[in-house]
Image (cartoon, rainbow, N blue to C red):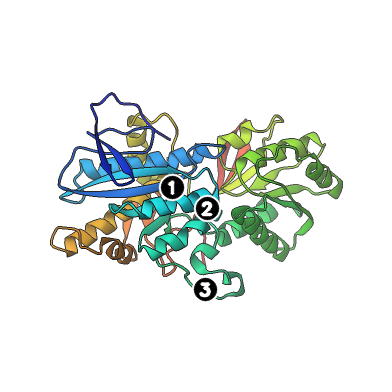
Amino acid sequence: MRHRSLLILTTVITTGALTLTACGSRDDKGGSDANSQGGTTVVIGVDAPLTGSLSALGQGIKNSVDLAVQTANKNKEVPGVTFKIEALDDQAVPATGKANATKLVGIKDVLGVVGPLNSGVSQSMQADFDKANLTQVSPANTNPSLSQGDNWGKGEFKRPFKTYFRTATTDVVQGKFAANYLFKDAGKKKVFVVNDKQTYGAGLAAIFSDEFKRLGGTVVGTDSVTVKETDFSSTANKIKASGADSVYFGGQYPEGGLLSDQVKKAGAKIPTMGGDGIYDPQFIKASGEANDGDLATSVGFPVEKLPTAKKFIADYNAGGYKDPYAAYGGYSYDAAWSIIQAVKAVVADNGGKLPEDARAKVTEAMSKVSFEGVTGKVSFDQYGDTTNKQLTVYQVKNGAWADVKSETFKD
């Protein structure tokens, strides 16, 4: 996933805080354009960690949105409208994400935003987008409270922000799916649960733990680690002493890979399992010890095996991006395409041009969006959550992730 370097003559257009490159090129700073097809420009914002330890995922998000924009312009998906992107780096930091939200709200041509990657970052951005009636579609957020409110765990569902949507399913689904696989399929009965104290990791670990215990398993111990630290030997020793037959980690791959490594070095030759946050080749690279047998769940089915994703993969490979689309590429493309389809509906309903209240109209149109996307059927329920509840378990085999079970969650 990522950018491509094309030697194309560029013209710089500056509109307020936005600098875009024109002439059908893409640049390494997140600007994207195609040959102009009309006088109206619509910008799709992108917020993701484009630098730092999670950039492997963030760059895939950015590039996949770029590809959607290029495709829409090439096909003249919305007559008279040229789409562009404005990508901002949140570095996986909530405060930076909030600042980026303010910037994107201030760019009048931004009618939708794809991102962010992290649920904690999203929490810092939602209110700003909602006040501005600016649609936000995350391809990766999985924390349930973002769409169903803080009391969802008590059965009280209330959508906090009308502008929030996502193409990834929630941790309610992912956590239960993981617990069922570890207990029933993998046959593990005694798990040690670790989380990284972040919104995503702690939430996912809690949902997993509740379901694992409901199934009859035992949580033999719990601990937490700190993001960006590297010495988890204390936690690893606790895991070894607990007699656990498995580890569940709620967090991201930089810490997850190191934890797996140090657990095995402590003498506990047991699998580490986590959610979509660890499903990345960097998880494997972070471990000095062979971690064959480690497990991860991820939202959706393997993109490479979806008939609906063949064109996306081919177009991405042909696009010259220097980084892979990674775990969320397909969901990012679909997130951007949902915004494009909402814009298309708004323009069609207004005689072929954007209305003055375009942002509000796009948000309204999002609830009616429905199409066959890269990842399957794309549509949203009353909370803005995806109706596509597909998940997959992956296992490290011979030093690489391999899918071992895919399933559609049934409510």
Q: Are marks 1 and 3 in contact (CB under 8 Å)?
A: no
Q: Seen in the image, is 199 located left or right of residue 13?
A: right
The image shows residue 141 at horizontal and vertical percentages of 50, 54
Q: Do the residues labelled 2 and 1 touch (CB within 8 Å)?
A: yes
Q: Seen in the image, is 249 located left or right of residue 99?
A: right
Give the camera-side residue of 279 and 408: 279
Task: Residue type at mark 3: give it.
Answer: Phe
Task: Residue type at mark 1: give it.
Answer: Asp
Give the camera-side residue of 287 and 184: 287
At 50% across and 55% down in the image, what residue appears? 122
The residue carrying mark 2 is 121
The image shows residue 97 at horizontal and vertical percentages of 49, 50
* Mark 1 crowdedness (10 Å alpha carbons): few <14, some 14-19, many ≥20: many
Task: Residue type at mark 2: give it.
Answer: Val
Q: Nearer the viewer, mark 1 or mark 3?
A: 1
Q: Do the residues labelled 2 and 3 touch (CB within 8 Å)?
A: no
Could you tell me how far apart the alpha carbons at marks 2 and 1 are, in whole angstroms? 10 Å
The image shows residue 35 at horizontal and vertical percentages of 19, 37
Give the camera-side residue of 310 and 9: 9
Q: What element carries label 3?
A: loop
Could you tell me how far apart the alpha carbons at marks 1 and 3 are, in whole angstroms? 27 Å
Q: Visible in this render: residue 386?
A: no
Q: Nearer the viewer, mark 2 or mark 3?
A: 2
* Mark 3 crowdedness (10 Å alpha carbons): few <14, some 14-19, many ≥20: some
The residue carrying mark 3 is 157
Asked where in the image residue 9 lies, by quadrant, the reply is top left
Please count the marks in the image: 3
Which is more N-terminal, label 3 or label 2?
A: 2
What's the mark number on residue 47? 1
